[in-house]
Image (cartoon, helix red, strand yellow):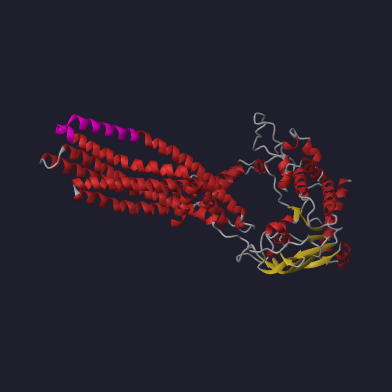
Amino acid sequence: MITSARTAVGIAFRTAPGLTGGYALIMLIEAVVPIAATWLTKLLVDGLTGQGSAASLTSLAIGLAATGLALAVLPHVSLFLGSQMGRAFTTRTTDQLFTATLRFAGLRRFEDPAFHDRLRLAQQSLSMGQGIVTGILGTARSAVTLIGMIGSLAVISPVLTGVVLAAGAPALVAQLRLSHRRASMMWDIGPAERRQIFFGELLASVEAAKEIRLFNAGRFLHTRMMTELRSANAAHRRMDLKELSAEGALSLMGAVVAGGGLIWAVVGAGSGAMTVGDISLLIAAIAAVQGGLSGLIAGIAGLHQNLLMFDHYVAVTRAGPDLPIPAEPSPMPRLQHGIRFSDVWFRYSDDHPWILRGLNLFVPAGADVAVVGLNGAGKSTLVKLLCRFYDPQHGSISWDGVDIRDVHPDELRHRITGVFQDHMQYDMSARDNVAIGFTAARDDLGRIRRAADQAGIEGVLSGLPQGYDTLLTRMFLSEEDKTDPSTGVVLSGGQWQRTALARSMFRGHRDLVILDEPSAGLDPEAEADMHARTRGQRDGRTSLLISHRLNTVRDADLIIVLSGGVIAEAGTHGQLMALDGGYARLFRMQATGYQDHAAAAS
């Protein structure tokens, strides 16, 4: 927590030093003013009862009026400065948090549920981080006020001062325990809250709306969502009851101490041992000390909880890379010889089975290599390793003899383009959906059009209501047409696949083209056209095609059949058919399906 506190204060002073310094100064003045007001009140009352001079009474009245003015104005000033500082702080921490996520070169953390829980809590803590700074300064303000009031009370009755302070000690311990339990509860219920958000997003999702309504699954998802919500609410309720019982007992103890002090003051006044001013000071001091203790304890408890939550932000922003980045990366040669997988073993964690088991594979430069196999054979995993989203547990992958772990991941990926089976559909403009493949050339509309034309989608995109500036979503409206609810356009599945292909082609000439099921879901005519276009993209370049449809890979220079994490067969289409093994069996099975479909259609 000390690290989190230092981090938060450091961010505040680096981000907005003037605002933070001004806020600290105002808080200090706010801490002193109540003490001054209490003593001015005592002196004024004693002066009035003791017939003080008019000049001294006037001075005391002016001073008391000034403190009243300060008490009225300063909270508004501190609130304004705190809000400005908070926005600056949140902007800075948000930038740092998501900059930190960009440093994760691989996918391991993004496929880890525990990391998602921590990341969600880190996002929640962004606003709490500003609360840490204001909490520290607020605690300091309360401490200054409290010390002054304790001193004032001690002048009247040291014994009563000790009783009031002793009554505050259990409150501090109890509040710290409660804050720790609440922070622990937030971590415990994190998965339930994330699932509740997930089900809620499904119920409001355009993508899921058709299937949910077709299968009448809305009530099922609604029930799941409410179950998770009630589970989280129950945890909150149990925590609220603990806080209610603890704080109720502490408040009762405080009331007893205050009542006892008041009775003692009245008795003292009746015996003539105390002046009227002393009594006013005593009453004000007891209330101020108790209020100060309560505020200080609440501030410390709130600060404690915020620090525990901000620990998640610190953990994410200070997390080391998920993949080792070489301190002095090797130069990345242009691919001239080939890519070699040497005895590659890989599984996603120690609790998962092996996906690749000693894989040995050579992809010659300039060759068109296809990888086929049943689901779970390791085809997509092979692509993830080649892009270095993960590192193998054993073995190596070399690019013209250079281990890809010895080069910077950005440089490796700069040499690669491709289309993934689960390609993204960005809720942005058509221009951005293509240009995101190479953002440095986003302003080159001619290049965007050429890539779209190569992918067979240029006519569709240029014919949109606002051309390439049309939003490909119904989730948002553009600033230019926010008064027109018909501006957003939703593409069909095939059109999205062609847009993803255009995105890949927009990157220009790259050493390696990866096509992971680029035609999945297309009709035969569109599939044939898609593969004709991708063949043009792959012409003269090294390419890796992942496909379930064996008719799309028959022209490949080399076909690799994966099974059980190893290469079961390898060769050209003719060689594999002559081998009459698993590939030939699957090809004939699919071909029979096509023939039966054609016969039925005729």
Q: Nearer the viewer, residue 295 or 600?
A: 295
Check if residue 67 falls in the magenta segment.
yes
Residue at the location (14% across, 31% down)?
51
**Eyeballing the image, is 372 above or below 73?**
below
Check if residue 236 falls in the magenta segment.
no
Residue at the location (34% across, 35% down)?
70
Residue at the location (29% across, 32% down)?
65
x and y percentages locating residue 356 in the rendered image: 70, 66
Predominant secondary structure in magenta? helix
x and y percentages locating residue 599 in the rendered image: 88, 49
Region of the chain picked out in magenta, as a range:
46-71
x and y percentages locating residue 445 in the rendered image: 77, 40
The N terminus: image quadrant = bottom left
Q: From the viewer's perspective, tell me whether residue 446 is left or right of residue 201.
A: right
Residue at the location (41% across, 36% down)?
77
Q: Nearer the viewer, residue 92 or 583?
A: 92
The tally of labels here is 0
**Eyeballing the image, is 588 above or below 296?**
below
